[in-house]
Amino acid sequence: MRKATLLAGSLVLATSCATAQPARQAASQTPDAPAAVTPVTTAPTKGPEPVKPTGDAVNVRKVSWTKAKPVSKGKKVALTWWSGVAPCTVLHKVKVKETSKKVTITLYEGTARKARNVSCIMIAVEKTTTVKLKKALGKRKLVDGAKP
């Protein structure tokens, strides 16, 4: 008798789990409506991460910027670009070449020397830095030195 009760209870439990819907899903579904979709939310972003050149990176390479905005009456340029996380990816230096017709700005990134034996996650980070010009930008064209 004891085995029969245990077997009957297991069968009831197994069949009810296979056919029952969670209360939230059952209430939201009708024959003509699709299943409810739970929206995915992410934390709000606070904007690009401000960085300054370290000057001590290794494996340095040119990196393209995505935005350049004159600030301080054109005496400075705020640059924005996508990068990796520090110390695996740091801004090494910024090279500025000014002529009467254009201003060429080149960003150089590399790996910080202290990043030995560090695990680097592969995630994109928006970064920004501000560059001071010798004279105000005026009508001169801004050029990305990393682009051919």
Image: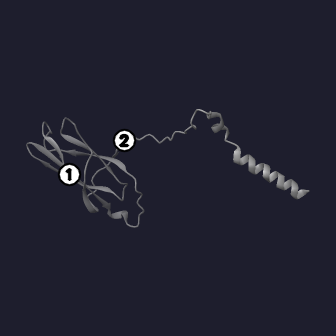
Q: Position of residue 35 (x, y in %)?
A: 58, 38
> What residue type is disc 1 on?
Lys
SS state under label 2: loop
Give the class, few, some or many, for how many residues have Cα within 10 Å of label 2's Cα (few <14, many ≥20): few
Q: Which corner quadrant of the image does residue 59 belong to? A: bottom left
Q: Is residue 26 left or right of residue 16?
A: left
Q: Position of residue 104 (x, y in %)?
A: 16, 48
For the point 40% across and 56% down, the residue is: 122
Q: Nearer the viewer, residue 51 or 26?
A: 26
For the point 32% across and 61% down, the residue is: 111
Tell me the tag on residue 47. Answer: 2
> What residue type is disc 2 on?
Gly
Give the class, few, some or many, for how many residues have Cα within 10 Å of label 1's Cα (few <14, many ≥20): few
Q: Earlier in the sequence, mark 2 or mark 1?
A: 2
Q: Which corner quadrant of the image does residue 108 belong to? A: bottom left
For the point 36% across and 56% down, the residue is: 86
Q: Nearer the viewer, residue 51 or 97?
A: 97
For the N terminus, give its image quadrant. bottom right
Q: Position of residue 145 (x, y in %)?
A: 18, 51
Farthest right residue? 1
Camera-near label (2 vs 1) is: 1
Q: CA distance from mark 2 to mark 1?
A: 24 Å
Q: What residue does disc 1 label?
A: 147
**Number of marks present in the image shown:** 2
Q: Position of residue 62 (x, y in %)?
A: 23, 56
SS state under label 1: loop
Q: Which corner quadrant of the image does residue 3 belong to? A: bottom right
Farthest bottom residue? 117
Question: In the figure, 114 relative to 49: above or below?
Answer: below
For the point 70% across and 45% down, the residue is: 19
Q: Is residue 45 left or right of residue 127?
A: right
Question: In the figure, 98 relative to 115: above or below?
Answer: above
